[in-house]
Image: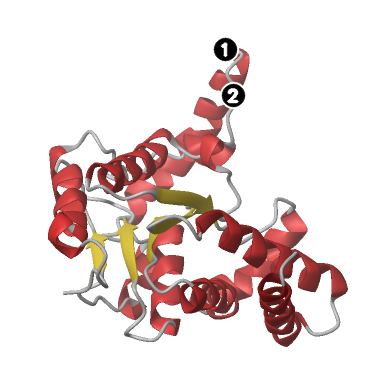
Amino acid sequence: MTADYLALQEEAHHLARQLFGQQAEKVAAFTDRLMDIYTRVRDKDFLLIHNPGGWGNNVLEHCIQWERNVVAGTCATIERLGYTPLLVQHLRSGTSWWERIRDMRDQFGFFAAKARLLATEVEFITGHLDNLKVVLIGASQGAAFVNAVMQQLPSLQPVYSIELGMFFPYISRRVITERTLSLDWNGMVPDAAVRRDLMAGFRAYTAAPFRWAMRWLQGRPVKFSNCVNVRGHNYDWGYPYVQRRVVDFLETNFGNDTKGESGMR
């Protein structure tokens, strides 16, 4: 290891200590994640950070299909514009029921504590890689989390967000800037989860156990959350409106004429 790398690692460790105090395992995990991302992205143009919907603990291959499609479409667009991206995930919650219950307070508080962790991570990475651009991608509760992170970042950071179908309890706390693309419908059907259509939500959750059981009986088990199909809460890349808005946002901010510059307009 070089002296520069060791100095950077010590800085990352110091940040982790500020966040987690004497919790040695969390300090070590946060430090390792910072150094891993830094090492993998330092030769790239873009860092894409996907923040899953729901409880925020689904690895990408277990996310609902339309969410995976949007992430893939965003990556492909960045590459088409001539950039090399690195895609990572930020899983904001554990998988146990205890961890979910413990995180509920933070969800009700617009993710203040959890958002601080990712904001610190992004500031560290961009602070050491001058030409790197960052795009945060979030769906549903993940969209709200991304917006909370954006609010904790300095306005001049080269960080942008794509927020899809933010769940209605968070809409009043949302802040939209020129670096934010926030979609509240898919161009086909109004999103009941955004529009506070409680009856549509009730029907979706009532039907979900039957869909979940049917998939298991068919030998195609999925997570229960993937069976909650709220009307209009679908932002598939194949929908012309969704694809056009995302592509336009990326081309406007990162078109070839801005490559190698800050990318900000």
Question: Which quarter of the figure is the N terminus placed in?
Answer: bottom right
The label shown at residue 213 is 2
Give the structural element (helix, strand or loop) at label 1.
loop
Neighbourhood count class around disc 2 (C-alpha, 10 Å): few under 14, some 14–19, many 20 upward: some
Q: Left or right of 56: which side holds 148?
A: left
Residue 28 visible: yes
Q: Left or right of 241: which side holds 221?
A: right
Q: Nearer the viewer, residue 78 or 67?
A: 78
Instruction: Check the image and report above or below for 247 versus 151.
Output: above
- Report the amino acid beneath label 2: Ala
Q: Which residue is mark 1?
A: 218
Residue 140 visible: no
The x, y position of residue 70, in whole percent, is 33, 43
The x, y position of residue 102, in whole percent, is 71, 68
Residue at 32 percent of width and 67 percent of height: 160
Residue at 55 percent of width and 20 percent of height: 215
Q: Nearer the viewer, residue 253 or 172?
A: 253
The label shown at residue 204 is none
Residue at 33 percent of width and 65 percent of height: 161
- From the viewer's perspective, is the residue at label 2 or at label 1 nearer? 1
Q: CA distance from mark 2 to mark 1?
A: 9 Å
Q: Left or right of 112: which side holds 132?
A: left
- Report the amino acid beneath label 1: Gln
Q: Nearer the viewer, residue 215 or 28?
A: 28
Q: Left or right of 1: which side holds 189?
A: left
Q: In terms of sequence position, does the residue under pointer 2 or pointer 1 come before the other?
A: 2
Q: Quadrant of residue 165?
A: bottom left
